[in-house]
Amino acid sequence: MTTKTFSTKTNHQKHPNHHYHHRRPLFSLHRLQLSIIVLLLASFAFLFVLFEIQYLKTPLITSSLSSQTSLLAAWDFIHQLKNLSSFADANEKLRRAVTFLPIKDLRYEKTAEDGHTWFMSSIYDKQEEGEVQYQQFPSEASNGRLLCIKGHDTHGGLWNSYALAWPETLPYNATLMKGLTFISYNHFGHNNIWHGLSAMVPFVAWNIKNGCSISPTRWVLFFRGELRNNLALWVTKLMEAAFSAPLNVEMFDSVGGGHGGGGSGGGDDQPFCFEEAMVMRHNEKFMSRQRREEVYDLIRCKARGYCKVSLTAAEGGGGGGIGMTLLMRTGARSFKNETAVVGIFEKECKKVEGCQLTVAHADNLTFCEQVKLMSMTDILVSPHGAQLTNLFLMDKNSSVMEFFPKGWLELAGVGQFIYRWMASWSGMIHRGYWRDPDGVSCPYPDTDRRCMAIFKNGQIGYNKNFFSEWARTVLEDVKKRKLVEGKEKSKGGSENASGCTCSSAGGWTLRNT
């Protein structure tokens, strides 16, 4: 206890002619001292009486000890009140100390696609060898703090911001979003099915690693720091199948978006904090081949279940034969003479017993129609384009034949190889490319990068002899493979996908039910 000492020393020596004026303050000071002492004594007397009531109810032999305990309890109570006041002050300071940073850091604009990305740049990712890179909140890395986002601008990423806050000291006017939130950053957008799937695959991989039993309450999509809700419908359906739950994309235009928020409002300055959040911002680039294959196995299996694809339909050719599908495009990178190309492959297919040719345009098919078609396809023939993303929905070890217009090899960069990579990651066999040597002219030398803008959407011609020989070779290889698989199946060594179950190792296995 701190004792305050009041000085009664006067300035009489300094002002001998003003005795009257300094005696009144002295008298007032003594009265103030006396009042304080009386108030303290009265307070202690009151507390003493309260605790002595308990003392009167106890045996006489313990009266002395009880009195001491009562006084100690009284002092402890007073200190607790003081500590509560200090705690409230600390919480107030922590609330006001939450600092929001721009969600897009322009310092890393030139390396936004790799390395230290510009999205939420102050926080580093967690990564284990062969697994996806991710950020988790709350976690040890975040010191138990939650992720908060403020702003929902769809045109300027610099207007959106983020911060970390402890659950007990969220920023003022914040809405706590209950449940698990998946937050995806994609530098190329989510509306293209290839880029959209690449952004979603890491969440499926993380789910597999954590026992395949976690479904998010909501998804938040960012494109270069801008909020988005235009996830491709095809990708939306895949994720709904993979997680066995509707895919709810949050736009923060109303509190909670119907997904567990509370309060009112939803303005640009209102923070939204997430009870649990997983942030992915590097797509699938750091995943091992084994993990990728597990992810594609799962999505294929779940998609077939979602679309109620039967075992018979899932067998190539609809009954153990060979299914060859020409998945065509309209416009950019389409065949100049589609009829001639179909005729070439149709002729070769007819030479092989059990071969069934299907010609389709992906933009004319529903999601489940595409899933069913791919489940019946052993050989996929298609120009380079987003429709080839369907390839992983075929049975494993199926074949892919890909076609390009003029100029892509020289100018398109590594992006032209994405479907070869995808085939490898999902357990398919990429049978190579055919690149049209002829096409539209460019006013610059063909190696000038400015020509790519012209070549990018060019149409594709055909070479009858090359196409015929290529188709014949692939058909023969697939026929041999199917014969071997048929013998293994008759011995009980092969299973098909009628059900999906999570293995004890954290991966997905396919089994008959």
Image (cartoon, helix red, strand yellow):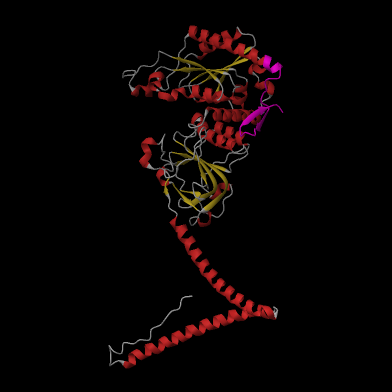
Q: Residue at x 31, y 90 (%)?
A: 12
Please state which of residues 323 and 296 is positioned toward the viewer in this rendering. 296
Q: Does the magenta run of residues contain 500? A: yes
Please state which of residues 209 and 328 is positioned toward the viewer in this rendering. 209
* Rendered location of residue 420, percent (x, y): 49, 21
Q: Does the magenta run of residues contain 8? A: no
Question: As displayed, is residue 257 above or below residue 443?
Answer: below
Question: As displayed, is residue 450 above or below residue 351?
Answer: below
Q: Is residue 42 left or right of residue 457?
A: right
Q: Is residue 438 left or right of residue 47?
A: left
Q: Residue at x 43, y 14 (%)?
A: 436
Question: As displayed, is residue 418 above or below residue 248?
Answer: above
Q: Residue at x 60, y 77 (%)?
A: 68
Number of numbered discs: 0
* Rendered location of residue 47, percent (x, y): 59, 79
**Quadrant, the C terminus:** top right
| Residue 343 in view here | no
The segment highlighted magenta reads 487-513
* Rendered location of residue 91, percent (x, y): 49, 60
| Residue 508 in view here | yes
* Rendered location of residue 494, percent (x, y): 67, 20
Q: Residue at x 38, y 16 (%)?
A: 440
